[in-house]
Image (cartoon, rainbow, N blue to C red):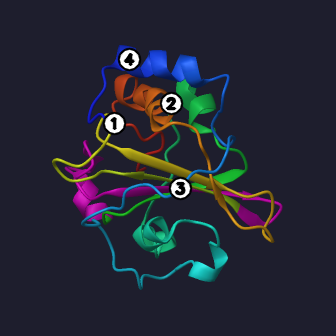
């Protein structure tokens, strides 16, 4: 797998694969590579989502995001021209970052890039049930990433069904998320700290 792709290559890949799949759609695939050192609160943090509530999510990803509701919540929306992209994935969203707030702020402002080991989780709720869990992982040096991140997205039609991993290519995810880097300088993450 390629470590880093230029923006032009990522855009071309996204355009070529767009007719095949899209954010929140596509066929299920197998688990992605796992993370290494997670940056952030312990998995016992408040707001823990029991594994039984995440059936179908690859065990490696489920372990990686364990306790995400106790992480640092990102609530500042993207700049107006990017809000439609930041609202991708369907449902009502909340987004968390694994590092504690103190690790993300300097002189009262959020600093970028996110440190190695960071996990970002976007949760989508529809009909009162979690129907989307999308994650971004900042792997350590020498590990596979596109523009510094690994992406995985899991969806389900309702709270009674298991999750399935979305088969959209990571290069397509990176092509969309690149706008958060190039247009608002928030390291591929649309939401940020207030």
Marks 1 and 2, how far apart at CA? 10 Å
Q: In this picture, is 93 found above or below 99?
A: above
Nearer to us of marks 3 and 2 is 3
Nearer to us of marks 3 and 4 is 3
Nearer to us of marks 3 and 1 is 3
Looking at the image, which residue is at 48% across and 82% down?
Answer: 46
Residue 63: image location, x then y, percent:
43, 73
Q: Quadrant of residue 1?
A: top left
Q: Which mark is residue 9?
A: 4
Q: Nearer the N terminus, badge 3 or badge 1?
A: 3
The residue under label 2 is 172
Q: Quadrant of residue 43?
A: bottom left
Q: Magenta residues, as a range?
A: 101-130
Q: Which mark is residue 158?
A: none
The residue under label 1 is 146
Q: Nearer the N terminus, badge 3 or badge 4?
A: 4
Q: Nearer the N terminus, badge 1 or badge 2?
A: 1
Marks 2 and 4, how far apart at CA? 10 Å
Q: Which mark is residue 30?
A: 3
Secondary structure at badge 2 equals helix
Residue sitting nearer the eye, 151 or 71: 151
Marks 3 and 2, how far apart at CA? 17 Å
Marks 3 and 4, how far apart at CA? 25 Å
Residue sitting nearer the eye, 17 or 149: 17
Contact between marks 3 and 2 (CB within 8 A): the answer is no
Q: Nearer the N terminus, badge 3 or badge 2?
A: 3
- Residue lying furthest bottom in this view? 44
Marks 4 and 1, how far apart at CA? 11 Å
Q: In this picture, is 172 found above or below 62?
A: above
């Amino acid at each position: 797998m390629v470590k880093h792709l230029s923006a032009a290559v990522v855009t071309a890949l996204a355009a070529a694969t767009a007719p095949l799949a899209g954010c929140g759609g596509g066929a299920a695939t197998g688990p992605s590579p796992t993370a290494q050192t997670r940056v952030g609160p312990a998995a016992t943090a408040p707001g823990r989502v029991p594994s039984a509530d995440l059936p179908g999510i690859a065990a490696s990803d489920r372990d990686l995001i364990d306790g995400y509701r106790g992480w640092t919540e990102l609530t500042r929306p993207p700049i107006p021209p990017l809000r439609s992209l930041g609202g991708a994935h369907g449902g009502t969203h909340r987004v968390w970052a694994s590092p504690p707030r103190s690790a993300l702020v300097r002189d009262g402002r959020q600093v970028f890039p996110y440190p190695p080991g960071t996990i970002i989780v976007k949760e989508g709720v529809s009909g009162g049930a979690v129907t989307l869990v999308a994650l971004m992982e900042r792997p350590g040096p020498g590990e596979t990433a596109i523009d510094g991140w690994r992406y995985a997205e899991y969806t389900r039609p309702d709270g009674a069904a298991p999750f399935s991993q979305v088969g959209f290519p990571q290069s397509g995810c990176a092509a969309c998320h690149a706008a958060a880097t190039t247009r608002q300088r928030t390291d591929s993450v649309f939401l940020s700290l207030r």
